[in-house]
Amino acid sequence: MENICKFKKRMVYPEQLNLDQIGNKSAQNAASWCSEPLEQASNNINVPEIVKISPVKEKNEEIYSNGGIPQTTANAQFIQDRIRHLVDAFSTRAQAARERIETPATPSSISSRETVEHQQHSIPMKHKLSISFSDRYIEEKDTKFLSSKKGLIRYFDRKIIDPNGRFYVTWMSIAAMAVFYNAWVIPLRSTFPYQTKLNRPIWMTFDYLADLIYLIDMTCVQPRVKYLHEGFWVIDIKLLRSNYMKSRRFKLDVLSLIPLDFLYIIWGPECVILRIPRFFKCHTFWEFFSLIDKLLSNPYVIRISRTLMYMMYLIHLNACAYYSFSTWEGIGSNHFVFNGKGNAYIKCFYFATKTATSIGKNPKPTQEIEYMFMTFSWLMGVFVFALLIGQIRDIISTATRSKTEYRKLVNETLEYMRRLNLPQDVQRRVQLWFNYTWETQRTLDENTIMDCLPHKMKTDIAINVHIQTLSKVKLFADCDEALLRELVLQLKSVIYLPNDIICKKGDVGKEMYIIQSGKVQVIGPTGDVLATLSEGSVFGEISLLGISGMSRRTADVRSQGYSNLFVLSKADLNEALIHYPEAQDLLNKKAKSLMKKNAALEKKHKAMIVINNPSPQEKNNKFLDTVLQVLPPGSATNRLLRYGSRGKPTRNPENDIFKYRNSLPIIKGNYGNSIENYFEGNVTVHRSMT
Ligand SMILES: Nc1ncnc2c1ncn2[C@@H]1O[C@@H]2COP(=O)(O)O[C@H]2[C@H]1O
């Protein structure tokens, strides 16, 4: 029995363990006070049941042998249960401590939701800081706590609110509505006789509902909104609470809930002006608008609505002032005041709108005080109008700024080309380029948009935007992801029009290309299409790789229709390839195989010429030219000399048309404008000709 007591004393219940101790020492150290098998168990979560029970057996044997009196099964059961409980708790905590030790303190780009939650539940740190660089909405979801009533309370007690999250935005819209209700209704009911004995309960219900929203906001929502401190999200509830309580917002919230309504007992419930402290919460209304302004991708509608709302509110206040002025002077007592006919609010609002907008035709003031009232109303109207027009102009100009800039640039460029008297075709193509670029990108220079962003963010955006194309690029599919991240920011987007020559054979290569959309054709030396490349294909890389004998463009590349390409400069490519030799190998292999293919094609083509169409000798051409010039264009000899024994052009594109055609003079004849046109791809030169 003594032994059992000793053993019980040595057992420290897991609930009493301070996890900081475990965290500061290692997981093993935390369990080291325990017996040997327990130590093993704490480090190993999947401990077999037999191992966990073994110390009990040993202890029980010891008890039997020492005392000689058999112990009750209840004691044995108790020890077994406690040990199992202890082992389980140790396993979990040792694992937690190990994770904590292993987790680096450096910020991670991954939102470590679980780590944060775990720290929050079990580690009593003074400053619980969570790191979250993603803008994703993080909402606390912990279903296991929701199973019981106590758990539910604990769950809400721990709930942290993301200031950019959906929950907060929804709540703020409700709170803003409550503020708006008070702001509109308090002046209305204080001046107009709209609160009667009959409808008082309805008004009161709404009033206290709004008050309840104020109260919930102050006690349950605002103290849980996480905030950034030195770049980290603070999620410790105590810190959040104290931060809110030190803020100006809290003071205003407390002021807004001053229960002056108790004075209804003295002045009666008609004295709605006693609710005036509720105006102190108008900061919630502004905060709500700036929140949605930040979150919406197109906030112009919200901005215009807010401005209109301000204007309406000022007119509403003016209407209330006019009515109370009228009651003070006596309704219908002169021409200036409200005459008491019709709906009071509508009539007064109409008067206030006319004054505020300076439309005129207002009733003429009869007394000095009325003149003062009118002067004040007009001044307010001028202010409202200036505010409204200025804001709407700002909103519209911001919304259409990029389009205006685009139009200005197009006009300037076209004007410049007209001044230089450039050919119509060039002007047309430039205009086409502007139109197409604007239609597809909505900006003329994508890169400048992101200039202000930090490098990592730019890379993330660029990868996200171009991921579809880049995932199709075989070169990148086989390469290191880091290479992709390095290259993606160096890519410049360029648009080519139909039939634009992108690379010219023999030119020095300075850039390589990736097709974002559209198609390009690789043209062989004979003008035939060697390959048609589409989205995700890479070309123009051979001349950049520094392979001996291939430092110039090996083929013409032409845009078939409109094509959007990414351009990567030689310097950027080479810089990246230094660190990624496997990518270099891949490109070299591809270049060599392409060159082999091209060489084979060229060889085959030369053989065809030798067999079928040997090229005329240069020296013969001069003589032939002279003879052709002398001969009448339609004569049989002329035809024989031009087209060989067939006497007419054939449709064989395999022939070497260029050499021969280039040596011919332009002859106007039966074949349209020039013989040049006729020869386009149709020349057959027969052996008999030479
Ligand atoms: N037969 C071919 N098939 C596909 N692409 C080619 C072929 N020949 C050349 N090219 C590409 O056309 C590009 C022309 O410029 P480069 O020589 O720099 O790199 C070349 C290759 O990327």
Image (cartoon, rainbow, N blue to C red):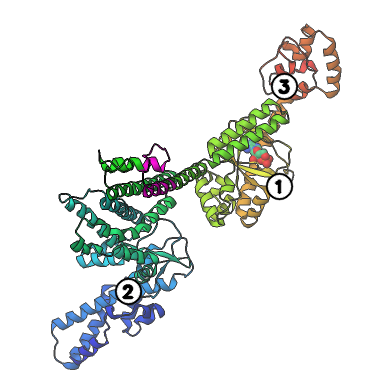
Helix, strand or loop at label 2? It is helix
Q: Position of residue 460 (x, y in %)?
A: 51, 53
Helix, strand or loop at label 1? It is loop
Q: CA distance from mark 2 to mark 3?
A: 86 Å
Work out whether mark 2 precedes mark 3 in sequence or the reverse, and give the earlier one.
2
- Marks 2,3: beta carbons within 8 A: no
Q: Which mark is residue 250?
A: none
Residue at 22% across / 82% down in the picture? Answer: 57
Helix, strand or loop at label 3? It is helix
Q: Position of residue 622 (x, y in %)?
A: 85, 20
Would you name the residue on which mark 2 appears? 91
Mark 2 vs mark 1, foreground winner is 2
Question: From what the image shows, is residue 282 above or below residue 396?
Answer: below
- Marks 2,1: beta carbons within 8 A: no
Mark 3 vs mark 1, foreground winner is 1
Report crowding for label 3: few under 14, some 14 to 19, many 20 or more residues within 10 A (C-alpha). some
Would you name the residue on which mark 1 appears? 547
Residue at 20% across / 85% down in the picture? Answer: 60
Q: Amino acid at mark 3?
A: Asn
Q: Is mark 1 within 8 Å of ligand 1?
A: no
Q: CA distance from mark 2 to mark 1?
A: 61 Å
Report crowding for label 2: few under 14, some 14 to 19, many 20 or more residues within 10 A (C-alpha). many
For ligand 1, the image quadrant comes to: top right
Question: From what the image shows, is residue 473 above or below residue 121?
Answer: above
To which quarter of the image does residue 172 belong?
A: bottom left
